[in-house]
Image: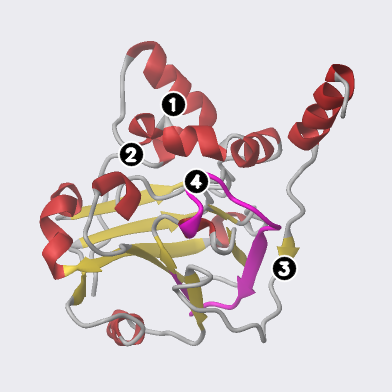
Amino acid sequence: MLSTTATFFLLLLLLLEPPREKRMDPQQRTNLVRDGFVVAHGIGSFSELKRSVLAQLPVDYQFLDYSYYIRGTSLETWHRDVTSGQAYHRTAHPTYTVIHYLCDGDLLSVSPGSHRTLPFSWGAPLTLTGGAGTAVLFNADLLHAGAPNRIGAARRAIQYKVAHVSDLPALSHLAGKHVAKDGGGSGSGRGLHRWLSWKTAWLTNSLLYPLMQTRLDGWLGALQRLVGIDFYNNPSTNGHRMS
């Protein structure tokens, strides 16, 4: 058996080891049940995006009256979508996030299958790469992170939410929300933040997720700003509506 000292250093090594992120093979095929995400390319308009997404889902799914336009930044810390995920809102059916990218490059990092292993995640994360018009549909309980922003203000994306019609009351807090966030060409979780969020995702997503759902004042608000959690509950400013 391992000694106490050896066990300590083994745990320390596991804590300090960074996630071994790699790019996903463009030819790799995934599905929503097993992997928790699918990718489509060459999507132009919102109507085209809507047709493509709903074709992947059972009947009675629909887009929420919600959008989040993101320019010049990326939420680079690892998280699950606590504002809409089935695990956090006890919906009867899985809920989904769709991100339509309007730029080229590394887009989104995901931990395949992690929607089935809450609050933990196993295996190496994948970074999805594509061109403008790439759309990623993923289970809102999937552990994911925005890819590091290396193109500055040119990085643009629009996020949408999709749910079963019977679950819309559970997500009514998102109805009519059209958020715009302009990061001015920055990232939101570089280096230490990204590494720390990967190592503590099980804790954040099982115990601290209420901090990610509501913007707070005082020392808790300061903590939200420090770790980038305020990205999640950024208030609606200049809304970007669906077209």
Say which quarter of the image contains residue 164. Answer: bottom left
Residue at left 87%, top 29%? 1
Distance of label 3 from label 4 (alpha carbons): 19 Å
Q: Which residue is mark 4?
A: 79
**Residue 234 image point, x, y percent:** 34, 40
Judged left or right of residue 31, residue 150 is right
Look at discs 2 and 4 and give the one toward the viewer: 4
- The amino acid sitting under disc 3 is Arg
- Tell me whether the residue at label 4 lies in contact with that at label 1, contact meaning CB atoms closer than 8 angstroms: no
- The amino acid sitting under disc 2 is Asn
Mark 4 and mark 1 lie on one chain; the one further toward the N terminus is 4
How packed mark 2 is, by other alpha carbons closer than 10 Å (few <14, some 14-19, many 20 or more), is: some
Distance of label 2 from label 1 (alpha carbons): 10 Å
Q: Which residue is mark 1?
A: 224
Mark 2 and mark 1 lie on one chain; the one further toward the N terminus is 1
Mark 3 and mark 4 lie on one chain; the one further toward the N terminus is 3
Q: Residue furthest front?
A: 1
Q: Which residue is mark 3?
A: 23
- Tell me whether the residue at label 2 lies in contact with that at label 1, contact meaning CB atoms closer than 8 angstroms: yes
**Residue 57 image point, x, y percent:** 31, 80
Distance of label 2 from label 3 (alpha carbons): 29 Å
Tell me, yes or no, if residue 134 can be seen here.
no
- Tell me whether the residue at label 1 lies in contact with that at label 3, contact meaning CB atoms closer than 8 angstroms: no
Distance of label 2 from label 4 (alpha carbons): 13 Å
What is the magenta range?
116-137
**Image quadrant containing the C terminus:** bottom left
